Image (tube, rainbow, N blue to C red):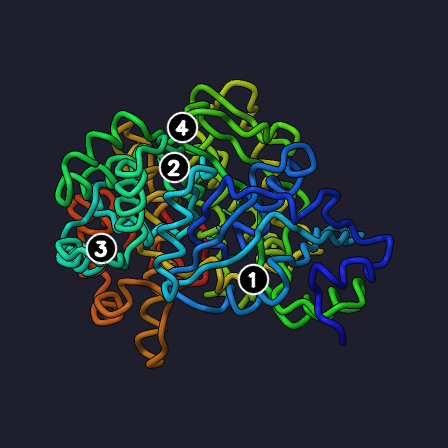
């Protein structure tokens, strides 16, 4: 079968949307770290729409940890197919990514960061890619940060971490007399822009204080809320894409039709007119982030750990279980919503109903095991902050502790079966998994929650409830 590429675009059937702009005339306005499925489903699709109006915002991808995306996309000239999953799936070829660089091309990465056309450096490197401590500041003990601190002393430093690359690239811009850029985090962290700003300046301070001052003055780090459910690519998608497009695509992407991107209006220089792609620019993004992270992602992780324990495979299957669906709804309405102050224009009860309907969408096969990855990095933002707020306000935490208990059981099952989990802390987690109190005592995840007697009682009650096959824990 012929491979998707710039030359074969014309062979696509009329039903498949494709770039309506001259790709050869694009300029590279964006350097994006982490061009994985979520970026390609979400931000790259928004820029693809923008490029129809303004050719200055082409994307150069940087994949630091694997060659997979580069090997799939570069032979296709950066093109890939996006499937929008609904009753009637739509297919669209995205053209906003020009090339994907890997750590084997450090000169090209630096060249892209320190290029006059570059105005945005964005990231979807997942929670762990920011190398933060539990308090949200840069973890100077993190092996990747320690290695960068060491290597930065040499003139031919090739950073290993994303934050290291930011410091390296921004220093090169400063030395070249270029303008500052907007550094745009698109990961599911509360206050993602501010955390990235503080981390970047902290590392720069340790390496080159002059650059730290320059970053503080010339670079903007807007907060951003990103949302679109993006199940990992599987063979079924590859086959559907081949059938619909008549071309072989090494790495197509799928997502639900719904997408939301709210960006704080805080740009260094010109702001891309992404409104044409449905993006909202807002003065204050934190309320949107909190609502989305706590309600959607909090419920997602809950469904994942509880659902896996009950033997379900996908989110839609878990939602088809009346007991579990009712639990997720009560958790959102009664336990999470009280800790969320609705941003202007967002009606929380309606938002919750919409999220539940998105989860139940039978057209989407979203594996619970995918959501269960990196629990140590996700749970603090998704459930533990909410739990902490509830404790401070004197609200019950029994229901909130149930998904935590489900995660502890998930770890225990993995440890007992000699299996593995995807989590940067998998070693210490699996080593402690047989004694849940030792896991909850890990301050890098739980902070001081692990010492709160009410929380510990609620987790214990949650464990007992799950053991007995109940989803409603008895109040502790
Ligand atoms: C999910 C998210 O994998 C996960 O942890 O909760 O990727 C979720 O699908 C997105 O944040 C939705 O916007």
Q: Counting other residues with Cα less than 10 Å from the Cα at mark 4, is it few (<14), some (14-19), or many (20 or more)?
A: many
Task: Return the mark for residue 232.
Answer: 1
Q: Quadrant of the C terminus?
A: top left
N-terminal-most mark, 3 or 4: 4
Mark positioned earlier in the residue sequence (2 or 4): 2
Q: Position of residue 324 (x, y in %)?
A: 54, 53
Quadrant in the picture for the N terminus: bottom right
Mark 3–mark 4 distance (CA, rounded to whole Å)? 27 Å
Residue 195's place in the image compared with 407, above or below, is: above
Mark 2 → mark 3, Cα distance in angstroms = 34 Å
Q: Is residue 445 above or below residue 198?
A: below
Res 141 label: none
For the residues bearing labels 3 and 4, Cβ distance under 8 angstroms:
no
Q: Secondary structure at mark 2?
A: strand
One can see residue 465 in this view: yes
Q: In the rendered view, does 368 fall on the left or right side of 400? A: right
Q: Nearer the viewer, residue 31 or 88?
A: 31
The residue tagged 2 is 183
Q: Of callouts 1 and 4, which one flags the residue occurring earlier in the amino acid sequence? A: 1
């Amino acid at each position: 079968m012929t491979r998707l590429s710039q030359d074969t675009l014309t062979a696509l059937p009329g039903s498949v949307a494709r770039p309506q702009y001259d790709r050869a005339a694009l300029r590279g306005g964006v350097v994006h770290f982490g061009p994985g499925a979520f970026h390609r489903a979400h931000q790259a699709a928004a820029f693809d729409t923008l490029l129809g109006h303004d050719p200055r915002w082409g994307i150069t991808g940087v994949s630091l940890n694997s060659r997979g995306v580069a090997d799939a996309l570069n032979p296709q000239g950066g093109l890939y197919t996006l499937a929008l999953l609904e009753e009637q799936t739509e297919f669209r070829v995205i053209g906003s990514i020009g090339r994907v660089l890997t750590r084997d091309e450090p000169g090209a990465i630096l060249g892209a960061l320190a290029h006059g056309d570059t105005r945005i450096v964005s990231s979807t490197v997942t929670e762990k890619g920011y190398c933060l401590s539990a308090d949200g500041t840069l973890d100077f003990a993190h092996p990747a940060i320690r290695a960068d601190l060491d290597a930065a002393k040499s003139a031919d430093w090739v950073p290993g971490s994303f934050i290291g690359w930011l410091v390296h690239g921004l220093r090169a811009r400063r030395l070249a007399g270029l303008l500052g850029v907007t550094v745009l985090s698109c990961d599911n962290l509360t206050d993602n822009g501010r955390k990235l700003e503080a981390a970047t300046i902290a590392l720069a301070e340790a390496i080159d204080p002059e650059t730290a001052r320059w970053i503080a003055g010339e670079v903007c780090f807007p907060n951003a809320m990103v949302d679109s459910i993006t199940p990992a690519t599987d063979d079924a998608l590859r086959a559907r894409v081949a059938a619909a497009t008549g071309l072989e695509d090494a790495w197509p992407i799928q997502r639900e039709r719904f997408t939301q991107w709210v960006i704080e209006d805080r740009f260094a220089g010109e702001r891309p007119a992404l409104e044409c792609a449905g993006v909202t620019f807002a003065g204050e993004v934190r309320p949107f982030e909190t609502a989305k992270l706590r309600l959607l992602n909090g419920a997602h992780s809950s469904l994942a750990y509880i659902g896996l324990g009950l033997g379900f495979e996908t989110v839609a299957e878990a939602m088809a279980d009346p007991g579990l669906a009712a639990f997720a709804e009560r958790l959102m309405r009664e336990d999470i919503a009280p800790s969320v102050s609705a941003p202007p224009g967002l009606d929380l009860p309606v938002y919750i109903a919409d999220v539940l309907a998105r989860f139940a969408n039978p057209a989407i096969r979203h594996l619970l095991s995918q959501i269960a990855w990196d629990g140590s990095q996700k749970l603090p933002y998704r459930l533990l902050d909410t739990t902490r707020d509830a404790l401070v306000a004197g609200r019950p935490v029994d229901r909130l502790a149930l998904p935590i208990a489900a995660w502890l059981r998930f770890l225990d099952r993995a440890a007992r079966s000699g299996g593995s989990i995807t989590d940067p802390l998998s070693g210490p987690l699996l080593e402690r998994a047989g004694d849940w109190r030792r896991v909850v005592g890990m301050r890098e995840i739980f902070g001081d929650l692990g010492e709160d007697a009410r929380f510990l009682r609620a987790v214990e009650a949650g464990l007992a409830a799950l053991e007995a096959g109940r989803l409603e824990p008895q109040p502790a």
